[in-house]
Image (spheres, grey):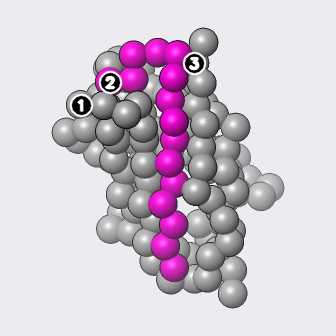
Amino acid sequence: QVQLVESGGGLVQPGGSLRLSCAASGFTFGSYWMNWVRQAPGKGREWVSAITSGGGNTYYLDSVKGRFTISRDNTKNMLYLQMNNLKPEDTAVYYCAKGSKDGATVTARGQGTQVTVSS
């Protein structure tokens, strides 16, 4: 049974930083692409970033390029999202999402962690 548990969200001022973590279990973590997706209040779900199974390639939504960094530790079954220079428009629930073995298509996601950027 796939389990994805996010942590690290919170309230931060504009320009601040947060690091999200996701603990994965119930599948062979190192064999799958992983994603972060988000959903802002009153809006649909939005893909944010993806990383290949081995971590060698990463992909980002244009609006977060240069500010967010996705990474993974396959020895610990952990996924991370370092978010710097946060903006109010980054406010959303952030979800860790399992991809497939050969792409970013979301096949499962966690319960999410709230990120609020406000002064």
Q: Position of residue 37 (x, y in %)?
A: 55, 45
The answer to whether the residues at label 3 and label 2 have Cβ atoms under 8 Å apart is: no
106 is within the stretch colored magenta: no
Q: Name the residue that disc number 1 marks.
A: 54
Q: Is residue 31 left or right of residue 4?
A: left
The earlier-in-sequence mark between 3 and 2 is 3
Residue at image location 32% in from the left, 24% down from the top: 30
Residue most toward the left? 56
> Can I make out residue 80 in this image?
yes
Query: Dot 2: few (<14), some (14–19), or many (≥20) neighbours within 10 Å?
Result: some
Per the rendered image, the range of residues in magenta is 16-30
Element under disc 3? loop
The answer to whether the residues at label 1 and label 2 have Cβ atoms under 8 Å apart is: yes
Q: Position of residue 52 (x, y in %)?
A: 29, 33
Q: Position of residue 25 (x, y in %)?
A: 51, 23
Element under disc 1? loop
The earlier-in-sequence mark between 1 and 2 is 2
Q: In the rendered structure, find residue 2 and report the number of the disc placed on it.
A: 3
Report the Cα–Cα distance between label 1 and label 2: 7 Å
29 is within the stretch colored magenta: yes
Which residue type does callout 1 highlight? Gly
The earlier-in-sequence mark between 3 and 1 is 3
- Nearest the viewer among 84 and 10 is 10
Which residue type does callout 3 highlight? Val
Element under disc 2? helix
